[in-house]
């Protein structure tokens, strides 16, 4: 016992020494490791003050209705572009010029739900001219000009509902495509909801984009069976000319879809040969049907939008065009429908499936050629699952939603339920890496991801749940995004950054193409606004019945006129404000006390109009809302409002008593 | 007790100086001779600040300013078609702040060629941000005109040259 103690003692002390030594060593090692690691990570996302980011990321605002512009790798937000929602910050949807942008066949709608931005392409490569985005609720597609970063066109999509499998462009931007998530009676009519099955239809809309101007027009709509068309992507390279749509609810349930739309073991990916249908339509195929939809166009010279209600649309019955539409069975309510850069593989992310299904375009063509069909649905041939299957990624995670690709032949899939991104090899279907996301990831984006030439380097995941990632801000938190470095074999988490609204999808690209072309001012010479005052001499106040038009100018640091009299209670006063500045980043703002709309923010060379209907007698100030110069606080004026029956003459002036 | 006295003394001194300053100012306009008394420093400063002509009236034909224009040859004859073009540009781009005949937000261009070199004028039009930072006259003008900045209206050199030709007719 004693000897035991004797032996134990030195051993114990040796152990202590060893532990101390190794633990000391360990601490040192892990300490220096994490230190080096984190500083390395910080360097990767650090963009020095005054330096520019390498990539633009355009992140949808979801229920904000807008589109936000970020820089990568810094994760800094540069701008919120108003698209489908009124935006008091700039006056979009409040000013007379921009109100028509939000007009629809249902009247003026101040809000939208924006989902999937996609950048225009030339020869399968991102060209950075325009970015398109869909509105989910009242189906519309918007086009944003990437010179001005302004929404310049919005087209409503008739016969559609829950415009979700949108707005993806073909590889020469021939079309921006919009598919319906909810099938509806076409044409809309009063009928029992329970009669859905066999009576409702789903419209897939092909909106042509004019090569030079980018003008949009609905070329045709394919009226499909009443499934839910969830997401879509274009074929590219060898599969250019085709478009692929995932479907769910092939059960055609009209209630409790949570259960009823998950009955079938397989739903479909619809493969649409749009070139074939285009040819059919060009030869007079399809028929025009009555419809009502708004087409809103913003003119950069009049600085004004006009809204036209269109009265008919061309529809095509897919069974009238043999060989144009096929169904590819795909397990378990596929959500994302993603095509790899070569155009060969179509990934169906079956959200209730344990495996990822990848179809082969070549095998699909072969099956079609040999007419290996496994029945039909509403006259549309169904191909054999095994005939078109290229491979499966086995048990990669839970709840696959979306897949993007890098430029090295790898794919990255998000898993909502297991909150992770899984990297796998296209062709061998082996899982290479997985990284957690925080939390519940939806879409992910790789710059140039939806094209023949992904630009790689970074991937970011857009998450639905934020929880503890930031300082808490009450029950509502901005959604979180995570940026990963994907240049190595293993993904590396670099950065968390908050996003705005509920970002669904994003489009990203190298900054250089867009940066060089970004507009700095609007040329005053090219301002064709009917109420523009292009110089001080053109300022005036004109009464026309109870409407009063004020032709006003702004320049640092005054309004002209800045004293206005002769307005009466009950008048409708139009402030048409022209910003005479011709210098980059010198906007002026305009607000008048008691205005029932938002301020105006007027870019150099622009004219914008705010309507004011004064209800009270008095002398009311107006002022510049955008801090424009050292004399910004002096940038103000007064407007006198007299009683309804007063005979105060119309008078205006600026600087009358100046020395 | 001692500190109290010295504080009072300092206060007193300050008060005296303060009063003295004020008095000097009042007298300045009456007596030029006051300049070289023992309050010299104060008065010289004030005299200097008030005496020189405002920048808008100062004549400096050698200063070419800072900017893209380093040398311009003005032919003896005024080019009337250029004048018309310049007047048009001036009307569109400059009248928000300048009146030909009178001081407005900015100075009047009438007679400007008697006070400034043609290069200086064009540089002020083409490169105002740098001018108000580096050119002594432009700096003083900014102060004289209440800090109201000369806006860069992004004229081309050709347009600025035409405006200059128009200014030659304003005498």
Image (cartoon, rainbow, N blue to C red):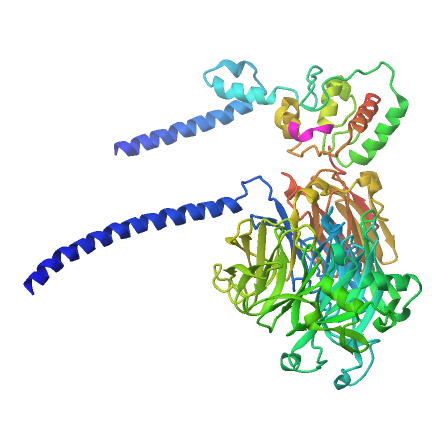
Q: In which quarter of the image is the C terminus of chain A?
A: top right
Quadrant of the image occupied by residue A382: bottom right
Q: Does the magenta stretch include residue A463?
A: no
Choose between A182 and A247: the one closer to the eye: A247
At x 89%, y 71%, the residue is A290
Q: Does the magenta stretch include residue B127?
A: yes
User: Compared with residue B80, is residue A374 higher up or lower down, i.e. above or below?
Assistant: below
**Residue farthest to the left?**
A2
Location of residue A105 in the rendering, given as x and y in whole percent from the top left corner: 82, 68
- Whether residue A537 sits left or right of residue A3 in the image: it is right
User: Compared with residue A25, is residue A309 higher up or lower down, i.e. above or below?
Assistant: below
Q: Can residue A647 be seen in this view?
A: no
Q: In which quarter of the image is the N terminus of chain A?
A: bottom left
Choose between A82 and B93: the one closer to the eye: A82
How many numbered badges does the structure rendering display?
0
**Residue farthest to the right?**
A284
Location of residue B65 in the rendering, given as x and y in whole percent from the top left corner: 68, 21
Q: Kindly report the secondary structure that dominates the magenta region of the rendered protein.
A: helix
**Residue farthest to the front?**
A370
Choose between B51 and B90: the one closer to the eye: B90
Location of residue B159 in the rendering, given as x and y in whole percent from the top left corner: 81, 29
User: Compared with residue A518, is residue A170 higher up or lower down, i.e. above or below?
Assistant: below
Location of residue A168 in the rendering, given as x and y in whole percent from the top left corner: 73, 59
At x 77%, y 19%, the residue is B113
Q: Can residue A572 be seen in this view?
A: yes
The magenta region covers: B126-130
At x 47%, y 25%, the residue is B20
């Amino acid at each position: 016992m004693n000897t035991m103690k004797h032996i134990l003692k030195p051993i114990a002390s040796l152990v202590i020494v060893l532990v101390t030594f190794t633990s000391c060593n360990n601490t040192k090692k892990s300490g220096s490791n994490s230190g080096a690691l984190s500083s390395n990570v910080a360097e990767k996302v650090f963009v020095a003050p005054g330096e520019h980011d390498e990539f633009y990321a355009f992140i949808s605002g979801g229920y904000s209705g807008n589109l936000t512009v970020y820089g990568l790798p810094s994760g800094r937000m540069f701008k919120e572009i108003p698209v489908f929602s009124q935006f008091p910050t700039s006056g979009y949807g409040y000013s007379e010029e921009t109100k028509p942008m939000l007009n629809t066949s249902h009247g003026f709608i101040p809000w939208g739900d924006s989902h999937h931005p996609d950048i225009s392409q030339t020869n399968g490569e991102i060209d950075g001219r325009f970015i398109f985005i869909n509105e989910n609720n009242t189906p519309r597609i918007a086009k944003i000009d990437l010179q001005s970063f302004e929404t310049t066109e919005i087209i409503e999509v008739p016969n559609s509902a829950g415009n979700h499998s949108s707005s993806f462009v073909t590889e020469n931007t021939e079309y921006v495509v919009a598919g319906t998530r909810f099938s509806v009676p076409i044409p809309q009519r009063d009928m029992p909801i329970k009669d859905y099955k066999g009576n409702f239809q789903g419209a897939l809309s092909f909106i042509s984009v004019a090569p030079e101007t980018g003008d949009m027009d609905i070329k045709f709509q394919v009226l499909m069976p009443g499934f839910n068309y969830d997401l879509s992507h274009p074929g590219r390279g060898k599969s250019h000319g085709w478009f692929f749509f995932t479907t769910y609810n092939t059960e055609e349930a009209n209630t409790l879809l949570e259960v009823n739309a998950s009955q079938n073991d397989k739903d479909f990916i619809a493969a649409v040969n749009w070139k074939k249908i285009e040819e059919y339509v060009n030869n007079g195929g399809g028929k025009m049907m009555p419809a009502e939809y708004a087409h809103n166009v913003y003119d950069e010279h009049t600085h004004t939008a006009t809204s036209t209600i269109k009265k008919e649309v061309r529809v095509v019955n897919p069974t009238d065009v043999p060989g144009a539409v096929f169904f590819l069975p795909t397990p378990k309510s596929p959500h994302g429908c993603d095509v790899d850069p070569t155009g060969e593989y179509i990934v169906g992310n079956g959200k209730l499936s344990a495996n990822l299904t990848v179809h082969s375009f070549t095998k699909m063509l072969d099956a079609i050629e040999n007419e290996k069909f496994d029945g039909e649905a509403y006259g549309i041939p169904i191909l054999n699952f095994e005939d078109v299957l290229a491979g499966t990624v086995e048990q990669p995670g839970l709840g696959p939603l979306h897949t993007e690709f890098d430029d090295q032949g790898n794919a990255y899939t998000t898993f909502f339920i297991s909150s992770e991104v899984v990297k796998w090899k296209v062709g061998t279907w082996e899982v290479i890496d997985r990284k957690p996301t925080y939390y519940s990831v939806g879409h992910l984006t790789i710059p140039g991801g939806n094209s023949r030439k992904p630009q790689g380097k970074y991937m970011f995941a857009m998450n639905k749940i934020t929880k503890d990632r930031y300082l808490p801000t009450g029950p509502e938190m901005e959604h979180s995004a995570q940026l990963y470095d994907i240049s190595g074999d293993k993904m590396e988490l670099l950065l968390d950054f908050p996003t705005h609204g509920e970002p669904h999808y994003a489009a990203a690209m190298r900054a250089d193409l867009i940066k060089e072309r970004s507009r700095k001012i609007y040329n005053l010479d090219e301002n064709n606004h009917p109420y523009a005052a292009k110089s001080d001499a053109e300022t005036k106040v004109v009464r026309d019945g109870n409407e009063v038009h004020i032709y006003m100018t702004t320049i640092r640091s005054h309004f002209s006129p800045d004293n206005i009299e002769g307005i009466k209670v009950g008048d409708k006063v139009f402030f048409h404000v022209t910003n005479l500045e011709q210098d980059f980043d010198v906007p002026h703002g305009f607000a008048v006390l008691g205005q029932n709309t938002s301020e105006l923010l007027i870019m150099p060379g622009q004219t914008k109009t705010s309507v004011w209907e004064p209800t009270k007698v008095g002398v009311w100030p107006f002022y510049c809302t955008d801090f424009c110069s050292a004399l910004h606080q002096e940038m103000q004026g007064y407007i006198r409002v007299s009683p309804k029956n007063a005979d105060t003459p119309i008078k205006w002036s600026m600087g009358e008593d100046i020395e | 007790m001692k500190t109290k006295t010295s504080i009072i003394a300092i206060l007193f001194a300050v008060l005296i100086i303060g009063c003295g300053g004020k008095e000097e100012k009042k007298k300045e306009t009456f007596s030029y001779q006051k300049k070289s008394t023992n309050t010299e420093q104060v008065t010289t400063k004030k005299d200097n600040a008030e005496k020189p002509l405002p920048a808008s009236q100062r004549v400096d034909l050698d200063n070419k300013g800072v900017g893209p224009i380093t040398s311009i040859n003005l032919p003896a004859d005024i080019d009337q078609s250029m004048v018309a073009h310049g007047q048009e540009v001036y009307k569109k781009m400059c009248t928000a702040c300048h009146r030909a005949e009178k001081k407005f937000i900015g100075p009047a261009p009438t007679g400007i060629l008697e006070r400034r070199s043609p290069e200086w004028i064009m540089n002020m039009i083409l490169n105002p941000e740098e001018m108000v930072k580096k050119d002594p006259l432009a700096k003083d003008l900014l102060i004289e005109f209440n800090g109201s900045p000369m806006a860069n209206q992004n004229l081309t050199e050709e347009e600025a040259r035409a405006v200059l030709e128009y200014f030659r007719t304003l005498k």
